[in-house]
Amino acid sequence: MNIIVEITDKLFGKEIKEFNNPYIRYGARGIIKRKDGKIAVFNKVVKNEYKLPGGGIDEGEVPEEAFKREVMEETGCEIENIKFLGITKELKSHENFQQISYVYTADVSKITESLNLTEKEKDEGAKLLWLTKEEALEKITKCLEYLKESKYENLYHSKFINYRDREILKYYIKNIK
């Protein structure tokens, strides 16, 4: 299976602690593209965070279906031409937490303009942006300097998300034409 990126504490200047029966979460996320070539980016204004659409896989859900659901919730879009890119691994030893994400690309088939955001996303000022892949990479890369904590996530957690999505986008730009 193609591993796009594996992120550890070492990347952020922290020592790696030994995992002790870690909590493992599975996610599905990726890049969705409109006909004009622009991709969806989820901006959480309160945290100054830019990220790709996606989230956790519910119990009994397969990764591709979770991706479709998350895209609909966060972008209001139905998607087609779904392709699996690979996985990412986030190994947060300071939280005894690991996240494995299945990463996809897809084309928008229908825009409903009806977002179904969680209370957390609403509290963090979440909004949908459509950007070129280069603009998206620039926003995701630059936001690392200005990330802020929210009442839901500390900077440690947010840095992993930021780095993960930056690497997904870099991989996409390099490998998908």
Image (tube, rainbow, N blue to C red):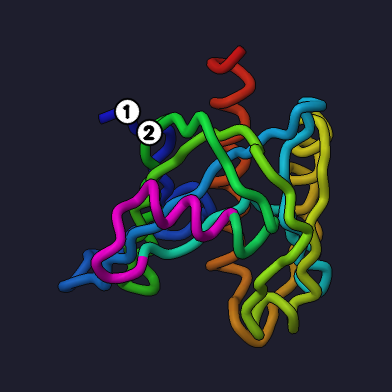
Q: Which residues are magenta?
A: 58-71
Give the labeled residue for mark 2.
Answer: 86
Give the labeled residue for mark 1.
Answer: 2
Q: Secondary structure at mark 2?
A: strand
Neighbor class of circle 1 (other Cα within 10 Å; few <14, some 14-19, many 20+) is few
Q: Secondary structure at mark 1?
A: loop
Q: Residue 30, image x and y in percent? A: 54, 42
Type of amino acid under label 2: Gly
Residue 135 vs 173, above or below: the answer is: below
Q: Residue at x 76, y 66 (%)?
A: 44
Q: Residue 132, image x and y in percent? A: 81, 31
Residue 62 vs 104, above or below: the answer is: below
- Residue 28 relative to residue 79: left or right: left
Spatial CA span between label 2 and label 1? 5 Å
Quadrant of the snapshot with the N terminus: top left
Quadrant of the snapshot with the C terminus: top right
When asked about the image quadrant of residue 175, the answer is: top right
Q: Is 134 inside the magenta-drawn segment?
A: no
Neighbor class of circle 2 (other Cα within 10 Å; few <14, some 14-19, many 20+) is some
- Residue 41 relative to residue 177: left or right: right
Q: Residue at x 61, y 64 (%)?
A: 73
Q: Residue at x 53, y 53 (%)?
A: 12
Q: Residue 126, image x and y in percent? A: 76, 69
Q: Residue at x 66, y 85 (%)?
A: 119
- Closer-to-camera residue (52/112): 112
- Residue 66 relative to residue 159: left or right: left
- Mostly what secondary structure, the magenta segment? helix
Q: Residue 14, image x and y in percent? A: 46, 59
Type of amino acid under label 1: Asn
Q: Is residue 121 visible?
A: yes
Task: Spot the residue most to the left.
Answer: 21
When asked about the image quadrant of residue 36, the answer is: top right
